[in-house]
Amino acid sequence: MASPVGMFSRAFVVAALTIGAVSLGLGGCGKEEKRPADPYDVSKMDFKAPPAAVTNTRHSGPLAVGEALGMDAAVKPLVPEPVKTIQLDTVHRIIEIAPGVKFSAWTFGGQVPAPVIRARVGDRIKFSMTNRSDEPIPGTDIAPAPMMHSMDFHAAMVSPTDKYRSIAPGQTIQFEFTPNYPGVFMYHCGTPMVLEHIASGMYGMIIVEPRGGYPTKVDREYAIIQSEFYTRLDPEHRTVDGQPLYVLDGEHLRAKQPTYTVFNGRYNGMVEKPLQAKPGERVRLFVLNAGPSNTSSFHVVGTIFDRVWLDGNPDNQMRGMQTVLLGSSGSAIVEFVVPEAGSYVMVDHHFANASQGAIGIIAAGGKPEPGGPEHHNMPATPTPTDPDAVKAKLAFEGKCLACHTIGGGDKVGPDLYGVTRTRSDEWLAKWLKSPETMLQTDPDAKTLLAKYRLPMPNQNLNDAEIGQLIEYFHWADENLQPQQAPPMAH
Ligand SMILES: [Cu+2]
């Protein structure tokens, strides 16, 4: 395809003028036959969709069914069959947002974000969904909270009062549509309060490719969905697997003050499990900001976006971009070349958001950066040089950072700066071995619990890890000033 984008954008301008002329009743200027066909000729679009069917038949078994569904960041290739049959049921689940942070979520298909759907302009999407919010949450004794849910596809052009209506627990809704525009679109629950349904996890991405595919060839395709979580400890103090349950914090939700801002549903998720690429490869990211309320300034450290297709439509092309700004439900396809071996860090360049977890790595071989990519606002704690203390720092960031800081202030648990001055090594060892025993027997532990009101879950540490952590606390207390500690996510 020679310069398809230039061609399309000229076509688009001409088409827009044509449509404008027609709608003003000024058509028939005699030049129409020379104009290239409008790829968005509304008269050729498919708006025919039979009314949605709502029944009392319930799906059982798998919650997400369909060849066109992808369950993680690696985007599946397009399935060629033009009819895409998709089932996404709504269930309530406990998801883990960060280590030890179990959140009571509402989902499509049992996961947050929901599966990525991939289709093409002109395909027929046959969608069905059972509201299964009345089913028990597996692995917990948390009572179900049955409620209405619905589905709103931004890729569709249909009557929302018909297709996007809310259905009751036990009901199934079925409807069809044909995507007419290419793009990367959000889908979400549209049941009031929409804000709460989205913040509870009910969103996903549908990729609609242009009819003839994309004008470029790439080596890797990944989906990145940014979203916010607003959490608070369950006022009823329920636990899951011995860890405290977190629920939606309505007050911070309305104030747009998230606890976590993340990619693909997990605090620093793609730092823990980086995406893979190789030097010289061209990478295509499908990026969606699901919000619900904040903006994303998406950036990849170490490269420049060769192409940015706003909203995922190659007709909306920009070249050589450093960041792309995405409002709530905004999206883009970004493509870039991996210039050399290294770890390329994806961030929301609103760094307050990145520090809440909107960070990930594209691992393209080579040596890791000395000390980790901390200067890109990883949730850094200062780095000791002793190998045991270094291991402890890593363990601390993996297992403890959700609830503690060192010098960054109290979170769910106390700031641990200075802890070796207030507690003996023996006390710390006993505490880390079995906080539950200490909370029953030790007066200092009881005082802590009275203040923090949450029993620290047992972290299943072995003696070696406990020794290393205590050494790390000593190192921190001897080497750091509290104000020296970097800010961390709350
Ligand atoms: Cu809902």
Image (tube, rainbow, N blue to C red):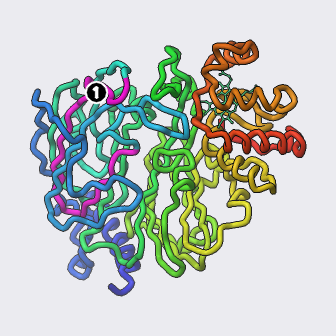
What residue does disc 1 label? Answer: 133
Residue 355, relative to residue 248: is it above or below? Answer: below
Q: Quadrant of residue 452?
A: top right
| Position of residue 156 measured from the top left corner of the image (x, y, whole percent) | 25, 50
Is residue 380 left or right of 258 when viewed as pictured?
right
Amino acid at the residue labelled 1: Ser
Which quadrant holds residue 16? bottom left
Magenta span contains residue 120: yes
Nearer to the camera, 233 or 217: 233
Q: Quadrant of the N terminus?
A: bottom left
Q: Quadrant of residue 346?
A: bottom right
Q: Note whether 144 is above or below 92 in the view shown.
A: above
Where residue 273 sits in the image (x, y, percent)? 51, 56
* Residue found farthest to the bottom: 2
Q: Tell me if residue 203 can be seen.
A: yes
**Can residue 41 be spotted in the picture?**
no
Left or right side of 282 for 89: left
Q: Which quarter of the figure is the C terminus placed in?
A: top right
**Residue closer to the observer: 277 or 385:** 385
Q: Residue at x 62, y 25 (%)?
A: 456
Q: Position of residue 48 (x, y in %)?
A: 12, 50
Which residue is depicted at the point 36% across and 77% down? 215
Query: Where in the image, quadrant-wise, is ligand 1 located?
Result: top left
Please check the rendered image and state whether residue 304 is part of the magenta-colored stretch, yes or no. no
Residue under the image location 76 percent in, 26 percent down: 427
The part of the chain drawn in magenta is: 113-140
Disc 1, SS: loop
Sort mark 1 into few (<14), some (14-19) or many (20+) by Cα contacts within 10 Å: many
